Amino acid sequence: MSSWFTNVALTHFLFTGAVLFVLGLIGFMTRRNLIIIFLCTEMMFQGVVLTLASFAKFHGHFTGQTFVIFALTIAAAESALALGLVVLLFRRKRTLDALSWSELQG
Amino acid sequence: MTYALYVGSFIGAVSLLLMLPRHGFTPRKFGALLGAATLGGLWLFLADHFDQILHVRMAYYYIFSFLAIASAVSVITHTKPVFSALWFVMLVLASAGLLLLLDAEFIAFAMVIIYGGAILVTYVFVIMLATQSVEPGNEESAPGYDRIARQPAAAVATGFLLLAVLLTVTFRPIEPISQRKAMSDAATISMQLSDRRVNHLVEKAGVEDPALLADAGRVENVERIGLDLFEKHPLGLELAGVILLVSLVGAVVIARKRIEAQA
């Protein structure tokens, strides 16, 4: 039992990354506030970053960490555009409810 | 062992479902306790099943990981958007701690600076611009799209099904790819940083300082990432710059549009 106090495996970090990704996914599907939906997208990025970094350490190679920089670039660009859209949508309908735009369906 | 993952995922799903906001009473504390117990039980069970050792300090992993998961759950279950954003900052800090454990110092600090310092600040500004006021004493005056989760059972079931499958795949033994291992510090310096001179440092200090010599012989994490980025991914770097430019122009175009306020 004392061995688990000294060693952490790759699998543990992948576990945390997977849980963060799935929590972001659930938040994305569940919340109706437009801003929180995009915040949960950023949470999915956090899970992916953790997975990339843990594989980089595991294989002893640094491409995983380099790819994190690209993912971060995309995350920043996407959040800027998403928030611009949210402000615009709020100005039109005065509500942040995602369902208020559901008349576009069908 | 997969049964433990499935059972853990199922109980975790139930506890998250309890915590998601809904009409009337939400048993948040009970859900939180159940979730914490599930996480603890799963970690205890999985402790014997490690296949690859990363030689990382254990207690820090558990602390940061628990903080990260608790903050993530708070982000998705809190009814007020400002608090969700603040808990997200906590998540970024916990995830930076985990990245430090993985010897990824540059991306740990880049995460804190870029997420906590730029992206989350933008989010809080937009929340300030676009939130209707809530009377302090009256819980019901908060807008319904914040107070009530949409189809929580289906979302949680889908999410945890994905998690169960992901975890089953995660806990298979894999071997590190030894041919792709990065070069050691000394080899990197001799091959790629060959004009890195120790002598001028020594001349300035005047004495043979062993700490300076040791410093010059070590390749830091930032230098490693820089070498990898510029040697192996130059096209990606240029494309990242183009994407940032495109998003900048796009954001300005989107924000300039004049909207007549409709009722």
Image: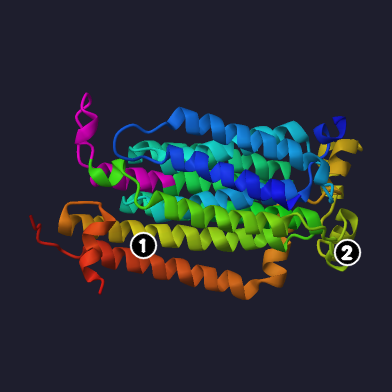
Q: Residue A85 placed where, x, y %?
A: 29, 61
Closer to the camera, B61 or B74?
B74
Judge from the rendering whether residue B199 lies leftward or rightward of residue A19; answer left or right: right
Q: Residue at x 26, y 71 (%)?
A: A105
Name the quadrant of the N terminus of chain A.
top right
Q: Is residue A37 magenta?
A: no
Residue B135 lies in quadrant? top left
User: In front of the other: label 1 or label 2?
Assistant: 2
Q: Quadrant of residue B17?
A: top left
Residue extent of the magenta highlight: B120-142
Query: Which residue is tagged 1?
Result: A81
**Residue A63's spot in the image, x, y percent?**
71, 63
Do dots 1 and 2 share one subunit? no
Image coords of residue B74 (percent x, y): 46, 37
Say if the magenta span includes residue B129: yes
Q: Indicate which disc residue B4 carries.
A: none
Q: Is residue B55 left or right of residue B76?
A: right
- Whether residue A18 is visible: yes
Quarter the C terminus of chain A occupies: bottom left
The residue closer to the viewer here, B153 or B230, is B153
Q: Out of A19 and B152, give the one closest to the viewer.
A: B152
Residue at 87 percent of width and 34 percent of height: A3
Cα distance between the residues tagged 1 and 2? 41 Å
In the image, what residue type sits under mark 2? Ser
> Which of the chains bears the disc numbered 2?
B
- Check disc 1 and give the amino acid type: Leu
Element type at marker 2? helix
- Residue bearing the label numbered 2: B178
Residue B22 or residue A18, whichever sits in front:
B22
